Image: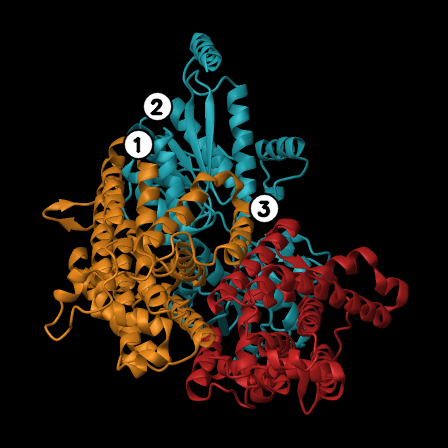
Amino acid sequence: MQFFEQLVNGLAVGSIYALIALGYTMVYGVLKLINFAHGDLFTYGAYLGMTLLASLALQDRLGVGLGLLLLALMVMGLVAVIGVVLERVAYRPVRNSPRLSAVVSALGASVFLQNALMLIYGARYQVFPDLLPQTALDIFGLHVPLLRIAVVLISVAMMAVLVLFVQRTRLGAAIRATAIDPSAAQLMGIDVNRVIRLVFVIGPALGGAAGLLVGLTYGQISFTMGWIYGMKAFTAAILGGIGNIPGAMVGGLLLGVVEALGAAYLSVAWKDAIAFLVLILILIVRPSGLLGERVADKV
Amino acid sequence: MSRRLGTGYAAAAAVLLVIPLVAGPYWVDVLNNIGLYALLALSLNVILGDAGLFNMGHAAFYAVGAYTTAILNTRLGVPVLWTLPVAAVISAAFATAVARPVVHLRGDYLLVVTIGMGEIVRIALVNNVFGLTGGANGIFGIARPVLLGHRIRRPEEFYYLIWGFVAVTVLLFHRLARSRFGRALAYLREDEVAAEGSGVPTARYRLLAFAVGAAWAGMAGTLYAAKMTIISPESFGFWESVVLFLIVILGGSGSIPGVVAAAALVVGLPEVFRGFASARMLVFGAVMVVMMIFRPQGLFPSRLPRFRPADLTAAAPEERPAGAAEGAP
Amino acid sequence: MKRTLTVLALALGLSSAAPAAAADPIKIGLLAPLTGSWASEGQEMKRNVELQTAEANARGGLLGRPVELVVEDDGGDPRTASLAAQRLTTSGVVAVIGTYGSAVTEATQNILDEAGVIQVANGSTAVRLTEKGLQHFFRTCPRDDEQGRVGASLIQKVKASRVALLHDNSAYSKGLADEIDALLKARNVNVVFFDALTPKEQDYSAILTKLKAAGPDVVFFTGYYPEAGLLLKQKRQMGWTVPFLGGDAINNPDLVKIAGKEAAQGFRFLSPPIPSDLDTPEARAYVAAYQKKYGEAPSSIYGVLAGDGFRVIARAIEATKSVKADALRDYLVGGLKDFPGYTGKISFNAKGDRVGELYRVYQVDAEGRFQLQP
């Protein structure tokens, strides 16, 4: 019984990892860059969501469903803007520099964003107003909060949309092409800068949405939450195969489940260590991930 | 090293020698901190700067050394200075064991693996692994070092111990850079394929770089443990590794004087700007981005060693003095 | 250039010609986490002690000398704290109040002790701090073993036969859990679960599920209020109704904000009395004075404990007519009996611990208020 309950727990947490992992994987696929600031964009989504929720009170004016939808769109839009600015300021200037410069720049951007948030909102924990119904389903003797199921469904839906976009549209093809070989893509007439900007719109938007979801689900956010979620999401992206979008989803869910089961049957105190261990093992045993990575071989 | 650099070092040494006589214990302690960070950064420099391996889990080696000293001293009564070599060996062994399966990974991946490794070490320390590490409390009651019958207790006394160690390290690492090993590291950093093709055993040398870097970090850990007399996992977290990484990059990876100078800046400046505590980190992040855009080579970039004819004739008999005889520095 | 020199000379001349201060001030230090994770505690500590300093100076200072407060930030981190302590020792303070957080205080003990400065901690409850034989260390806050005793009694009072202990691996939290564990085992109560969660996370459903599977009658969580709030909230979402108990790090109004009123209702925790429950007339007057100066009542008892720390130091200085550490120490141990602190009567034993029982039980009511239990 505990096994199935933990399974559900794991899937719920894992779907959040998956949403965030999408941002990492897309950016890495196109730029070969680990966007350390991505976790902070996730945090921004949560905080902006909280502020807008409190100040605009859309749920009162338009009803919970429509209000939250509109809120989500606004949050995603705002975080996407931050993402684009981030790319322009911290990443584009070092695009042709050695890898190390990009890494340091990403770290610096992460530190900057995190502390800016702290200065604006203060160091204390912030609380989301309690909006969503706390009802639960009782199936097969499992007591499953509806909210958890909703989170999984929303995440999967968003990922499905993204996969369709990347596989079936011209812009999506442009993204894939740039991921495979930026110079060749440029020669084929693809505006690489525009593609990169697009990636930095989609990735952060999804990350911001994840932040909002986390805020609504757990009710409590802090300005450092991006660090651990970011690390786990990155692990998930690598687990599934970096650059591989369905891989990010599989990786996220799998990591969530492994974590939950590890906590249940081994020890809760080592939960995070288990996640990192998974990361290291995957990189040693199968660095291309479960579903295979989709990046060009850049030496 | 070049004569200019040598004079620079001599001047710095002269200044450093007299500082404790004029500055109060607070500033001496700040300099102690700078010294420790300089040691750590120099040790990371071997891995990151010389060998070009992205290591962002260096605090783990520091922790292994500090905890080795703490455990040996508090449980077995081993005098602190005697634990120095033990800490070095155990850190090096640990680094070799951990790096072995991952040392072939490409840049970014190695970076993330080292982050993970650092975190695992920290979590293990907090969870009191093997019942030895004291959990979140850490270990307290570490004895002071005794050198030639004199117990080193006050900041001024630690100052000479730490900076003496730094001086020895700087000299040793300069020798290392010019040695066969050092040159091989530079080679495999610049072009791994060519190095392998020239017969440099890249995997082995990378591991060796890790081992050397870890050994030194371990010894810095011993000094830290003796100075604080209590250690806890909080001092060895991810952020420490990031700061060390940054010091090496900002100083100019591979450049020994650059790294020491950067340590002084990164550790010393916040003390000067204590008033702006919260904005400090913000500025730090911004500086990182700006540096990478405008001066990615760091403050004092290292230059590739220039060879003097003397180096070649002093080498093994089969090396010939023809060619590569650039002008004396 | 010449002009600047003249101006400088004049300034120097004027400043030295200024009437010598009536007497040079007595400097008292405050070590507090003004930044970092416990900034809210640190800020309250500062407010309390500053108010005390102002009141002391309004009464003419100590031994006819004005009191000067030297404040240093320890950032809630041992290393920053040790540097801050170093700075205090060089600034000429005769005593230091602080700090909050046992690991942080521990990093400063040796430095202050070696410099011969009296230290009165207000928020460091780890037992071992006073078990080292340090002669100059005191604390106005209670110790974890006292809390452990009260905790074990509470558990027995609710007649629990299967107990789960949950901590967060921090020094304070694990220490308290260990204390309670030992006491329960000595009384033959079955401890069915003993593990730690990772703080600063969001999702504790995994550990709650595991807890539930162990089938306890009561769960005692010894960690801090953010995690406690999340635990209560998620436990309710799971539909699990086993009662939870908490230690004093839970004592923070944000607990109810995070958990939600329904989830928090009925939750009990241990704590020294919160400022609004301090019932002596002097304490009430003090709370009113604090409210007048700062616009809100003090919310943390640790801040008030810092204020009491200042007052015992002041009393020691006046009683011994000295600022020498040994004289102060002898007075605090031997001479100070039942000093009327705002937090209750204060006396110190030879180890530097506060004598007396301070811990009480609180319950959260339906409105989210903390009600003192008899």
- Under circle 2, the secondary element is helix
Quarter of the view holding residue B153: top left
- Under circle 3, the secondary element is loop
Q: Amino acid at mark 2?
A: Thr
Which chain does the red colour mark?
A
Residue annotated with mark 1: C330
Q: Residues within 10 Å of mark 1 (few under 14, many from 20)?
A: some
Residue annotated with mark 3: C274
Identify the disc placed on residue C5.
none
How far across and down, in percent of the image, does residue B141 sit? 26, 53
Quarter of the view holding residue B316: bottom left
Q: Amino acid at mark 1?
A: Asp
Which chain does the orange colour mark?
B
C-alpha distance separating marks 2 and 1? 9 Å
- Counting residues from the start of the chain, the first of labels 2 and 1 encountered is 2
User: For this view, does C357 lie left or right of residue A3?
Assistant: left
Q: Are marks 2 and 1 in contact (CB under 8 Å)?
A: yes
Q: Residues within 10 Å of mark 2 (few under 14, many from 20)?
A: some
Which chain does the cyan colour mark?
C
Identify the disc placed on residue C320.
2
Q: Chain of mark 3?
A: C
